[in-house]
Amino acid sequence: MALNIPGLVVMALFYLLILGTGIWASLRSKKEEKKCTGDGMEITLLAGRNINLLVGIFTLTATWVGGGFILGIAEATYNPTLGAVWALMPVPYVLTFFLGGFFFAKPMRENKYVTMMDPFQKKYGNVLASALIFPALVADVLWVARTLVSLGGTMSVILDLPYVYSIIISSVVAIVYTLLGGLYSVAYTDVIQLILIFISLWVCVPFMMTNPHSVDISLTAYNATFQAPWVGTVELDEAGKWFDDFMLLALGGLAYQAFYQRILSSSSYTQAQVTCFASSACCLVLGIPSVLIGAVAASTDWNSTSYGLPTPYERDQAGSILPIALQYLTPPYISVIGIGAVAAAVMSSMDSALLSSASLFSSNIYKNIIRKQASDCEMQWVIRISVVVVGLAGTGLTFLDSSVLVFWLVGVDMSYTIMFPQLVCILFFKVSNGYGAIVGYIMGLVMRILSGEPLIGLPPAIQFPGCRLDKEGKLTQYFPFRTAIMLISLMSILLVSLLASIIFNKGLLPEKWDVFNVKRRQRATAKVTHVKRTNSEKEGAAVAKQLLDTTSC
């Protein structure tokens, strides 16, 4: 296939539009910095905590609706061993945003944190907090890598553009506009990108569904035609795995810095809630086109197309089914529009990951540990350098597919099995302390490694109930083992924290051994509570006296 020149022109215009929007947003951020009372770092990372409501909804939705979201839903729907019931992403994300809006946004905003790691640093200290930051940073770097991989594969199918070129160009554009204006640039480009995703996908759907090579998807939903029904099934012995995947997507997302960056940038708690609830609805709507495209691909007689046989699944190309369907089941000009949707989705997620990891490093490591006296100007350069380093690291990993897969799985699982229970404990359980956090961290990490992962050839040393060979002959855990590990980690943190608190408060061990200052912190907390109670009683007495004086007069 020859290089698709019209498609390249369209993509060039798209990238210029995104870059222009990023430059405009960076100029806006400089104006806001002059008006705002916050420091420069807060302007860059949180848009001065004054992001517009509509822009907030767009940027939060665009962060979650990435290349993996669009391509992954289409792949699961098309895959004859899975089906639409395994295309879970839109529904768990609704739960993510509702839980985040109702429970997690309030404590983070009330304490005016800059990143999700601030409460850890404040309570556990720099050493332990640094260890907890590591999996979050790894997850963000690999987020960059996997979004670029999805774009590179799509461009190579539709535009016949070499994989390397598409990766490098997209990476450079995202890095440049993120460098220019921080969250302002990311948020305002997300508005353009989300509009392009919505319009592009829905423009492609009618052409896809009316193509002459596919039968009516309502006929193939529950009937085997060219392959198994695209709706799919969840057998009773697979219910545990389905539930585990659902909870991983729903709760794991609450342990990503990118989520809290949007929540903390809102001007009020109410606005943060509205942002979450509106974004959940947007994710549902944006997931529908990918399901339909996957369903059409499953209802296609590929032998009648220029693609021919074997089918994409038999060629092990199910992961690229969306660009393949666009290329062979729609007119050329429509397939170019479709590539615009994927590119917009990739860019919207990549810039979020870049700024997320940069905020963790610059705020929690550089500012709070390495150079506490760093000026605003210095921090601006640290943020910029962090964005470049993370972008280059993620881009480099795209050329090592197996390594990306390994680290991606580590990052996602760590978010759910390690970071989520840690975040729950530090935000909602006062008893939690550093001792419990260490035990919970180690417990979650060790158990996850010993549970194995068939996708990377890691055999399970711990075999949970229902562990057996899957359809591809790989030993797989069908028990919701990741959820079990998360709960074990959560209980370990609370029980060990309680035990450590009792030991040091009862004097069973010398106070000099209390490296996390559990006893001292409880004294300080009790003192603050006593002062607040005393002040409240004094205020009450003063009000009562004033009322009595008024009555006597």
Image (spheres, grey):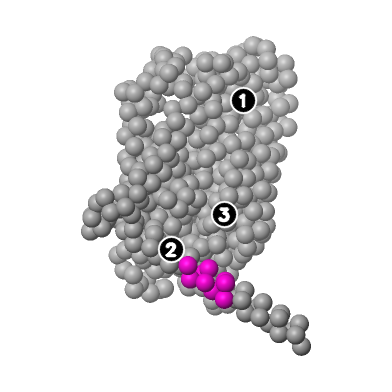
The residue wearing badge 1 is 84
Looking at this view, is 126 or 428 the one in front? 428
Q: Is residue 151 above or below residue 535?
A: above
Start and end of the magenta stretch? 530-538
Horizontal and vertical percent position of residue 338: 62, 38
Question: How far, Cα to Cα, is label 1 from label 2?
Answer: 53 Å
Horizontal and vertical percent position of residue 88: 58, 31
For mark 2, give the secondary structure: helix
N-term-proximal mark, 2 vs 3:
3
Residue at image coords 68%, 82% = 546
Task: Characterize the magenta stretch by its predominant secondary structure.
Answer: helix
Query: In which quarter of the view is residue 476 placed?
Result: top left
Residue at image coords 71%, 27% = 209
Query: Can residue 432 be seen from the camera position used here?
Result: yes
Q: Is residue 438 above or below residue 112?
A: above
Residue at image coords 44%, 30% = 484
Q: Which mark is residue 105?
A: 3
Query: In which quarter of the view is residue 452 placed?
Result: top left
Looking at this view, is 12 or 295 the one in front? 295
Amino acid residing under circle 3: Ala
The residue wearing badge 2 is 526
Amino acid residing under circle 2: Ala
Mark in front: 3 vs 1? 3
Among all residues in the image, which is located at the extreme top?
A: 224
Mark in front: 1 vs 2? 2
Among all residues in the image, which is located at the extreme bottom?
A: 553
Among all residues in the image, which is located at the extreme front?
A: 552
